Image (spheres, grey):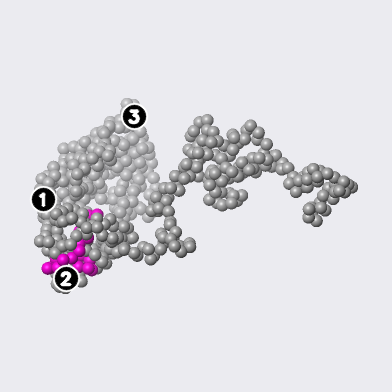
Amino acid sequence: MGGEAYDVLCDKIAPKRPRECNYSVVIATLEEFFHPEPLEISENFRFKCRRQGDKDAHSSEESVDEYLVALRKIATTCNFGQYLSTALRNQLVFGLKRNNIRNRLLEKRNLTLEEARDIAVGMELSKKSSAVIENGGPPQEIHAKGHLAKVCMKKQNQNQNEVCTVISVNNIVPKWWIDLTVDNVELRFEVDTGSPLTIIGKQYYEKHFKCKSLQKCDVDLVSYTNNEIEMLGMLHVQVEHKILPLYVVNMTKRPLLGREWLNAIHNWKHLVQIGEVNELRASANNLDTILQKYGEIFDKNLGKISGVKAHLTLKENAQPVFMKARRVPFNLIDAVDRELDKLVTEDVLESVPNSRWATPIVPVRKSEGKIRICGDYKQTVNQNLQIDQHQLPTVEELFASLAGGKRFTKIDLVQAYLQMEVAQEDREMLTLNTHRGLFRPKRLMYGIASAPAIWQPTDASPYGVGAVLSHIHPDGTERPIQFASQTLNKVQQKYMQVDKE
């Protein structure tokens, strides 16, 4: 026994001496001083306050099992008795750090401590496993202590070639192209001095060189953004009276002419074609022809659908609702005034002196500083309307209708709702109350609850372009060269304006 403990013992048993006490009394006296029995209320409070990963934990990343062990240790002095399992279960649920685990446990009725522990540990491990999978596997140590293979520059550079290709820079710099005869097949290559190898996609191999078997190679390719490019194999081909290696990868891009072939082809600079001048010129001519032929459709002024009018049906005993105009923010007043004048000029709105119905406007900012005038009809008309019902196609149905397509286009109408006229007898209920007075719409306005269902059956067609004439070039790419004029005739019969992008 040390001197400090001996002094404590003497003070505790005085006036007796230590020699006069037996061993059990000495042990009990020292135990009472150095390890006094904790207060039950205080220990219960400490048990209730314990949280996973808090300041009392060894680490902020304390696991579920470590947290449960800590709770069991505190519970030994809480005198829970038969309530021990229930208390441990409750505090385990209350003190968990992750809300999703807690929510999962609270969903289960008659939850036991063992079930709570198993569910919590399972969800914790699944999160860690998902993180490992997303990161491409756990880091692996290699020969040097503390040296991780994941960040080893030497290991990354072994058998790995980088294909440094920037796909597009807003057409600032035109691409370089070379037309080469490869095994008697005319192919157009994009010159890529950032790529050490010459590569083609899987579709080019299957179309032109399928008769040749691919050879295995130990080359790894990565893109400029450090994404791996799947290597399918390599074959030898004849180019300019030379046998050169051609690598096949799993991609859909055009063939790339790398430095290996550039070094072998001495006159490659004389073969380069900068940009796709001819194709761009032909495409521009075709587009100009279409725009000229259907110029009235692409006119900037707002058009009107012919032969169709929107009808709005009020509920029985519906009463008119008149609401005051709302203040327009000062920075939007000029833009709102311009839009109102424009809509009046285009015969979309007309000024009226009075009305039984009135709805305040909601100016919505659009691109290029434009404003769209909408009405807050949810406060007035919508709650009194019998909403038209029309089944709108779901996203899945739309995607199914496009299945098998390779190239897609769209026809975007200029403010589509405003191209549909509203029946004369239904216009008053759409009246807008603005800072300049009352305006009565003649067209279907944005914000009407029935508008989508009214518009959907009026749409010209749920399908895209009807006919496109395309040409397959020597390099295997397919490009449209002419559009059938009938593709716009149906639209022209109903719509006046299409947004030219």
219 in the magenta segment: no
Q: What distance separates the C-alpha of mark 1 from that of mark 2?
A: 36 Å
Please give left or right for residue 145 compared with residue 14 in the image. Answer: left
Q: Quadrant of the C terminus?
A: bottom left
Please give left or right for residue 64 compared with residue 344 in the image. Answer: right
| SS for callout 2 | loop
| SS for callout 3 | loop
Q: What distance separates the C-alpha of mark 1 from that of mark 3?
A: 55 Å
| SS for callout 1 | strand
Q: Amino acid at mark 3?
A: Ala
Q: Which residue is mark 1?
A: 469
In front of the other: 457 or 369: 457
| Residue 460, numbered label | none
The quadrant where residue 175 appears: bottom left
Q: Which residue is mark 2?
A: 265
Query: x, y (%) of residue 25?
Result: 81, 43
Q: Which residue is mark 3?
A: 318
Q: Which residues are magenta?
A: 239-261
In front of the other: 336 or 196: 196
- Foreground mark, 1 or 2? 2
